[in-house]
C-alpha cells in the first residue's frame, strides 16, 4: 500500500457518499451534498482505511464501511448545527439555514439510515451494531451536555468524558471497524481502538483551543460559540482551576447574554489556560502514538502516526 492507493480508495469512498444522498427534495439534497463535499478533512474514512490495511484489505467491503462512518459523521454535524443554531459549517451555510430545521432534522435522520444500510449490505453484521451503538453514545453525550449547560466547573475529567462521547467515539469506531473487517489480529484491533480514542480526544481538545484563537473564516464555523451556549470546555475549566475571582461572575448566563464573553476570553487567554489545554492535547496525542507502536512497521502505521500528530498542530 502507498499514498496513491490510499488516495484512490478515498476517492472511491467519496463517490459512494455522493451516490448515497438520494433525497427527493432537491433543495435538501443540494444542501446536504454541499456539506458533504465542502472541504471536510475526511479523517474518519482515512483512519478506517488505514486501519483496514493492517489486515486483509478488501475494497468491496472497506469502501462502503468508510462511507457509512462518514455519513454518520455528517448526520451528527447537521443535527449539532440545529441544536446549537450554528449558521456555518465547513465554510458553507449550515443545512438548517438553507432548508429549515424540520428538513435538516429529516436529512440527518436519512443519513443515519443510509449509513446503517451501507454497513449492513456489504460488511459484517457487527458493523451495523457498532454504528448503532455509536449513535446511542453520541445522543446520550449530547443529552448530558444539554443538562450541563451553564454549569461551569474546573473538572478536567468531566470535560474529557464529554469529549469521549461526542468526538472520540467516531474515531474509535473507524479504526475498530476497519481493522475487524479486514480480520486484523485482536491485539492490533485493541491497540488501534485505544490509540484512536486518545487521538480523538486530542483532536477535540485542539478544537476547543481553536474556538478561542481562530477566526470564523479560517475555522469554517462560528467561534466562541460554546461559551455563548453555556458549555464548559477545557480552556474555561483550566481557567476556573486558577481561582480567578473575577471569572465566575462573568460566566453567569445573564452576564454572557449581556456581552461578557470578550472579558471571559481575555481572562482565559491571560490565565495560561490555553497552554495547559495544549499540554493536555499533547499528552493524549503522545498516548495515541505510543498505542500505534505495537503495530509492525508499515505504510499504514506511518500514515496513522502522521494523521494523529496533525491533530494538535492544525489551525482549522
Image: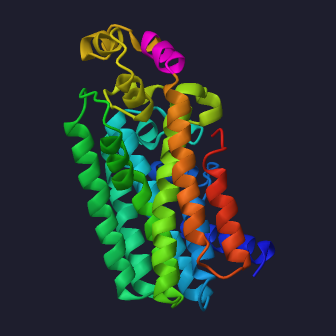
Q: Is residue 295 left or right of residue 72?
A: right
Q: Residue at x 47, y 20 (%)?
A: 268
Residue 267 on the magenta span: yes
Q: Residue furthest left?
A: 147
Q: Residue at x 43, y 57 (%)?
A: 168
Front-lying residue, 170 or 193:
193
Where residue 46 appears, as percent x and y from the top left, is 62, 67
**Quadrant location of the N terminus?**
bottom right
Q: Is residue 118 left or right of residue 131?
A: right
**Quadrant location of the C terminus?**
top right
**Residue 104 visible in image:** no
Residue 265 on the magenta span: yes
Front-lying residue, 312 or 110:
312
Q: Quadrant of residue 111?
A: bottom left
Where residue 273 appears, as percent x and y from the top left, is 49, 27
Is residue 2 shown above or below 94? below
Where residue 172 appears, as percent x and y from the top left, is 45, 66
Classified by dominant secondary structure, the portion drawn in magenta counts as helix
Q: Is residue 306 left or right of residue 183?
A: right
Front-lying residue, 67 or 6:
6
What is the span of residues highlighted in magenta in the rendered image?
263-271
Where residue 100 appears, as percent x and y from the top left, is 37, 39
Is residue 182 shown above or below 40? below
Amino acid at each position: 500500500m502507498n499514498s496513491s492507493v490510499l488516495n484512490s480508495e478515498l476517492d472511491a469512498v467519496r463517490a459512494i457518499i455522493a451516490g448515497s444522498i438520494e433525497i427527493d427534495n432537491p433543495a435538501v439534497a443540494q444542501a446536504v451534498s454541499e456539506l458533504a463535499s465542502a472541504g471536510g478533512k475526511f479523517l474518519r474514512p482515512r483512519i478506517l482505511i488505514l486501519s483496514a490495511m493492517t489486515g486483509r484489505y478488501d475494497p468491496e467491503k472497506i469502501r462502503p464501511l468508510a462511507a457509512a462512518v462518514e455519513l454518520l459523521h455528517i448526520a451528527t454535524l447537521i443535527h449539532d448545527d440545529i441544536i446549537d443554531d450554528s449558521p456555518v459549517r465547513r465554510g458553507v451555510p449550515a443545512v438548517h439555514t438553507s432548508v429549515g430545521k424540520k428538513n435538516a432534522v429529516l436529512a440527518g435522520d436519512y443519513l443515519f439510515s443510509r449509513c446503517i444500510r451501507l454497513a449492513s449490505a456489504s460488511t459484517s453484521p457487527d458493523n451495523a451494531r457498532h454504528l448503532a451503538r455509536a449513535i446511542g453514545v453520541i445522543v446520550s453525550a449530547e443529552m448530558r451536555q444539554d443538562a450541563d449547560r451553564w454549569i461551569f466547573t474546573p473538572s478536567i475529567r468531566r470535560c474529557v468524558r464529554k469529549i469521549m462521547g461526542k468526538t472520540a467515539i467516531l474515531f474509535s469506531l473507524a479504526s475498530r471497524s476497519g481493522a475487524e473487517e479486514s480480520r486484523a489480529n485482536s491485539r492490533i484491533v485493541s491497540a488501534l481502538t485505544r490509540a484512536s480514542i486518545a487521538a480523538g480526544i486530542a483532536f477535540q481538545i485542539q478544537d476547543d483551543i481553536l474556538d478561542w484563537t481562530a477566526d470564523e473564516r479560517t475555522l469554517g464555523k462560528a467561534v466562541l460559540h460554546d461559551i455563548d451556549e453555556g458549555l464548559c470546555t477545557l480552556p474555561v475549566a483550566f481557567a476556573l482551576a486558577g481561582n480567578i475571582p473575577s471569572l465566575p461572575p462573568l460566566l453567569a448566563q445573564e452576564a454572557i447574554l449581556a456581552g461578557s464573553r470578550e472579558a471571559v476570553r481575555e481572562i482565559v487567554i491571560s490565565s495560561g489556560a490555553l497552554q495547559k489545554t495544549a499540554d493536555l492535547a499533547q499528552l493524549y496525542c503522545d498516548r495515541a502514538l505510543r498505542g500505534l507502536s505495537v503495530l509492525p512497521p508499515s505504510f499504514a502505521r506511518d500514515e496513522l502516526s502522521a494523521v494523529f500528530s496533525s491533530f494538535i498542530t492544525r489551525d482549522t
